[in-house]
Amino acid sequence: MEPIITPSLRVGRSVISYSFDVLLIIACLTVYSYVIYGLRPVLLTLITIGTAMLCEAIACLLSRRRLTFGDGTALVTGGLIAMMMSPITPVWAAMAAAAFAIWVAKMPFGGSGRNIFNPAAAGVAFATFCFPRSVLTYPNPDQGLRLLWDTTAVIPQESVASVLKSGGASFETPMNMLFGNTPGAIGATTILVLLAGLIYLACRRTVSLHAFIPYVLTCAVIALVFPRTGGNLLNGVFLELTSGLLLFGGIFMLNDPTTTPHHASGRVIFGILTGIAVMLMRHFGRFEDGVCFAILLMNPLSSVIDRAAWQVSHFVEKRWLHRV
Amino acid sequence: MYKPTASHTGWKFGQIFLDSAIRDNIVLAQAIGICPIILAGTDLKSGVVLTVCTLLVLLPVSFLMSLIGNRLPNWLHPVIYTLSASILLTGAAFVLDNFISTTLYAQLHLFIPLMAVNTIFTYRVGGFSIGNRPAAAIADALGSSFGFGLVICLVGLLRELLRANTIWGVPVPIELTLTEAAEPFLAFILLGFMAAALQVHAHRKKDDADPAFIVSDEEVDARD
């Protein structure tokens, strides 16, 4: 029997440059969240990143391995988790998510480059399941959040994803959605910054758009055919694409070099399937957003998809292209 | 499909029991019978009831099938063991409802009949008992039930503790309450941890036996 090819990260400079690029975008998102909410999201991000690094250090010490901070993937995991949390998430919930991501989803599988599931998605999914009331309540963007511990005065707001889930009509203007002036996760509401980050990452060739574009198109088509909100269809599609973690997950977690297919055609199939899973979970799932769950669901399939795509393209090349 | 090895065909009663219960744990190593654990194993009482039901059904049916062996055509085997398991489970449900606890029966009324078509039966009875001697079949049935019971009781205990802060209905002074513990995901996470622990144990044994199995980090890096 042939060994199963697991997607693995190329070792060397590319890992560090990937981490650096992603961390740069996370830093931009954090600065923007400081402008919107105040100091709390920044502190929360720093604490989550610190927890992720600490957990990785402990795991390395326990398994008597070299410390693996050098590649920066622990920082990326912590940063991504913080970006997907609500600005008023309790500190312990964010820390639990980071600890779960490193200790359960990453290190037992062999550390960076060998993990099957996206650690950040696993951490956020864990926190969403265990503490839904703490993680899925959002503050009003105008409200200043200066203190780390005191969030009792915050009046919880419904996010656009939650409004769409309950079948209500959202009255957010497109401008508010683009500038992040809506209740939502720390780094996932500022669509303009995310798109700028995507352009930067694509120009640096840190991410490829092979998975992202089919993913967004699939989500858009499903939103168009099965709208969840009344009124203008195109507005509904726009809200569906810009709400929740859809774009954030598409940019960062769909392009994780370890847990997604490598082959271009495999990535296209992966993107389409993830889009279908996301929209299915939004329609029938329990929570307002299913991006993390959809990506976790697709992660184990990535090596299968990669291998199938490679075999098909190899077959096509051998059968038709070489004959000419 | 589980294949009986040479040692199983002998009379090593204890070995078969231990293999089925711990080393090749029916749930953690063979991934059989997960459904009742995820859905019904939310407290210790249901765990114990389902374990007793499994034992009461698996033991006689395994014995019966090992006696029948290959004397009957293959297509008749599933019919016989599913039918006999259904009859036994109907009796078990009746006893539970009328003589033990009506509330417990109301909680489990869906899962007890479903045990008859559980993969535990199709795998252990259909895959092991037929073609083995009655004593081996009994050892395997005991071991499988014990292994299943161990896992479902542990999962039920932990979920009950987290969900309601009780053990067997008795309150335990713990501050941490996680009402979401009754959801399936926590059982999946617990099963994952337990399966991983079993793998660690198995690998450690393998390491002890064969020093060449240990691979250093440098070798792994070089291999990549």
Image: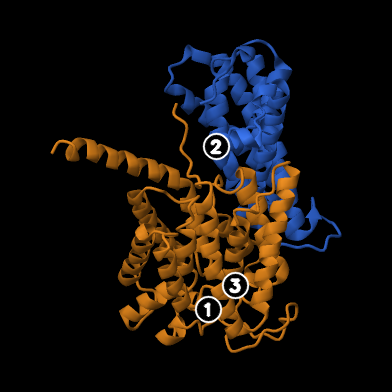
- Whole-number angstrom distance, CA of label 1 to CA of label 3: 9 Å
Residue at 52% in and 24% down: B126
Task: Give the position of the C terminus of chain A as an image quadrant.
Answer: top left
Chain given the colour orange? A
Q: Secondary structure at mark 3?
A: loop
Q: Residues within 10 Å of mark 1 (few under 14, many from 20)?
A: many
Give the x, y percent position of residue B136.
65, 16
Q: Residues within 10 Å of mark 3 (few under 14, many from 20)?
A: many
As drawn, the residue found furthest toward the right would be B173
Give the x, y percent position of residue B131.
54, 15
Marking on residue B118:
2
Q: Are marks 2 and 1 on the same chain?
A: no
Residue type indicated by callout 2: Asn
Left or right of B141, for residue A195: left
**Contact flag, marks 1 and 3 (Cβ < 8 Å):** yes
Q: Secondary structure at mark 2?
A: loop
Q: Secondary structure at mark 1?
A: loop
Task: Give the position of the N terminus of chain A as an image quadrant.
Answer: top left
Q: Which residue is mark 3?
A: A136
Residue type indicated by callout 3: Leu
Q: Which residue is mark 1?
A: A159
Q: Chain of mark 3?
A: A
As drawn, the residue found furthest toward the top would be B10
Q: Residues within 10 Å of mark 2 (few under 14, many from 20)?
A: some
